[in-house]
Structures are given as structure tokens and as C-alpha cells.
């Protein structure tokens, strides 16, 4: 495995999450914290990603594996340990109001190349959940995602609303752009209450993908690499379990608490 797996990171101190931040998550679906990797850790992961990507691009993985999850897992220990930080686990447990959380999905790389439509380099409004899906996602940018670099746009509070209601609202806003001959199937139009999250590598977004979200258009040249890892309550998603076992075949030797945290028990 990659040499960076041997590197122990000096990660950011002071990640204790306040009740105000958690209240903001409950209301609006997000808050921001300092990047847990710290400046040095960001550089290490940045270099590791650039080393891994060409190797990863040539690799084939079993059917059903999420390729961006495989890339995250290939970085190895620095990211595993980051996601296992006690302050982050404490935050996830408080947000999800449960004692038992697991990490069920991860991702690293240039997501718009994979999920965006090629012609637009933009992701349409959607939700990866809904009012009944409890989840906490941590999202970090390896390159600054500013207005010209396909920033994430979230609709605060929409995690509490019915899917049909929000979808109908977004469709009306899309039609109000006056650019369509018939009702479109994908909506991108700006919502008056959306928050365009300019994500700088110094900060990490803590949010629920149960909020409706989209991206802005990428007009800037250069990469737009993102990194994410998601916590779920018991019974929640275990999307990347098989990829984890595949890339870390020594998992049966992991301590019990680590296996629990990664959904392996
Ligand atoms: Fe999404």
C-alpha cells in the first residue's frame, strides 16, 4: 500500500463541537469546522491523492464498488484515523442522537467528472435522503471550491420538507428562468434561500445530504477535488463495506472498536 499510510498526522486541535453548531445543523442542515487534517495534513493528503489518482484511474474494481470510495480508502491510515477522531465521533453521536454510529460511505476525488453531466459540469438539485434519513457527512475541499469552481449549494432546512414539495418549488424556479420550451427534468436555478458554500481547504463542511443540494457551474480551470466521509446510526447505510474489505484485507485484525466503527461487526 501507499507510503503515506505510514505517516502519522498532527491533526487540528480544538475540534470540540458546540451546542450552537449542532442546533444550526438541526435547523439548517449544516455547519463548518476547521479542517481536522490541519495545514500539514492537508498537504500530505493532497500529495497522496495526486500520487494515487493515476494508479486508481487504471485499476478495475469489482462491480458495485463506488470508485471514489476506493480512492479515499487507498489513502489509508491518515484518512482512517481522521474519520476516527473522538471529537468527530462525539459530534456524529450528538447530531444523530445515538450512542452507536458507523462510517458507511466515503469518497475522494474529482466528483463532477463522475456524477455531473459532461456538458454542464454541474450537478442538478437533488437530495440523497429525506426527512426520514439520518446521516452526517463531513466534506473537505482539496482545492478551493469558490463560485467559479462548482461550489456545493444547499437549501437550508429542506431536509425537513417533503420531497415532492421541494421538487415542485425548484421546478417553478427553473421555469421562471424563461429558458425552457417544456418542463425540464433537471433543475439548476438559483433558490432565493440557498447557501452557496465556498469551501476553502481550511474548513470542513458538516452537513446532511438529506438537504436538497446542487452545485454551481465549474468555469474555472484546474481541479475541483472533494473528500467526504459519512456517519450513520445503527441500521444506516453501509455502501462501501465491500470496498473497505477489498482495499484493507487485514480488517479482521483490526481492534473490535475499529471494526464496529466501520460497520464490520
Ligand atoms: Fe448529492
Image (cartoon, rainbow, N blue to C red):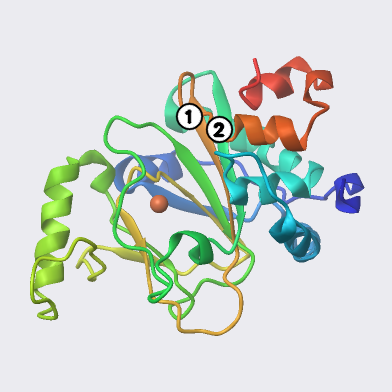
Determine the image quadrant of residue 263: top right
Res 237 label: 1
At 43% across and 40% down in the image, what residue appears? Answer: 22
Q: Position of residue 229 (x, y in %)?
A: 58, 44
The residue closer to the viewer here, 220 or 55, is 55
- How many marks are shown on the rendered structure? 2
At 54% across and 53% down in the image, what residue appears? Answer: 139
* Residue 38 visible: no
Find numbered disc 1 in the image and state the secondary structure of the residue it sits on: loop
The residue closer to the viewer here, 175 or 35, is 175
Q: Position of residue 249 (x, y in %)?
A: 80, 29
Res 193 label: none
The C terminus: image quadrant: top right
The residue closer to the viewer here, 5 or 208, is 5
* Residue 40 visible: yes
Mark 2 vs ligand 1: CB below 8 Å: no
Tell me whether the residue at label 1 lies in contact with that at label 2, contact meaning CB atoms closer than 8 angstroms: yes
Amino acid at each position: 500500500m501507499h507510503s503515506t499510510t505510514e505517516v502519522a498526522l498532527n491533526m487540528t486541535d480544538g475540534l470540540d463541537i458546540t451546542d450552537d453548531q449542532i442546533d444550526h445543523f438541526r435547523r439548517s442542515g449544516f455547519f463548518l469546522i476547521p479542517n481536522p487534517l490541519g495545514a500539514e495534513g492537508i498537504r500530505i493528503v493532497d500529495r497522496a491523492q495526486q500520487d494515487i489518482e493515476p494508479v486508481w484511474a487504471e485499476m478495475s474494481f469489482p462491480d458495485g464498488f463506488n470508485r471514489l470510495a476506493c480512492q479515499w480508502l487507498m489513502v489509508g491510515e491518515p484518512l482512517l484515523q481522521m474519520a476516527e477522531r473522538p471529537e468527530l465521533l462525539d459530534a456524529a453521536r450528538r447530531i444523530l442522537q445515538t450512542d452507536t454510529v458507523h462510517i458507511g460511505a466515503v469518497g475522494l476525488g474529482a466528483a463532477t467528472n463522475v456524477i455531473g453531466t459532461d456538458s454542464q459540469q454541474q450537478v442538478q438539485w437533488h437530495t440523497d435522503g429525506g426527512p426520514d434519513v439520518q446521516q452526517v457527512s463531513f466534506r473537505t475541499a482539496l482545492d478551493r471550491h469558490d463560485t467559479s469552481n462548482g461550489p456545493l449549494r444547499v437549501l437550508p432546512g429542506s431536509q425537513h420538507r417533503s420531497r415532492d414539495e421541494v421538487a415542485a418549488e425548484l421546478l417553478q424556479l427553473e421555469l421562471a428562468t424563461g429558458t425552457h420550451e417544456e418542463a425540464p427534468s433537471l433543475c439548476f436555478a438559483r433558490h432565493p434561500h440557498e447557501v452557496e458554500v465556498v469551501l476553502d481547504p481550511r474548513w470542513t463542511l458538516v452537513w446532511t445530504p438529506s438537504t436538497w443540494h446542487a452545485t454551481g457551474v465549474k468555469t474555472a480551470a484546474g481541479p475541483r477535488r472533494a473528500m467526504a466521509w459519512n456517519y450513520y446510526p445503527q441500521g444506516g447505510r453501509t455502501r462501501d463495506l465491500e470496498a473497505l474489505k477489498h482495499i484493507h484485507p487485514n480488517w479482521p485484525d483490526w481492534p473490535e472498536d475499529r471494526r464496529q466503527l466501520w460497520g464490520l461487526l
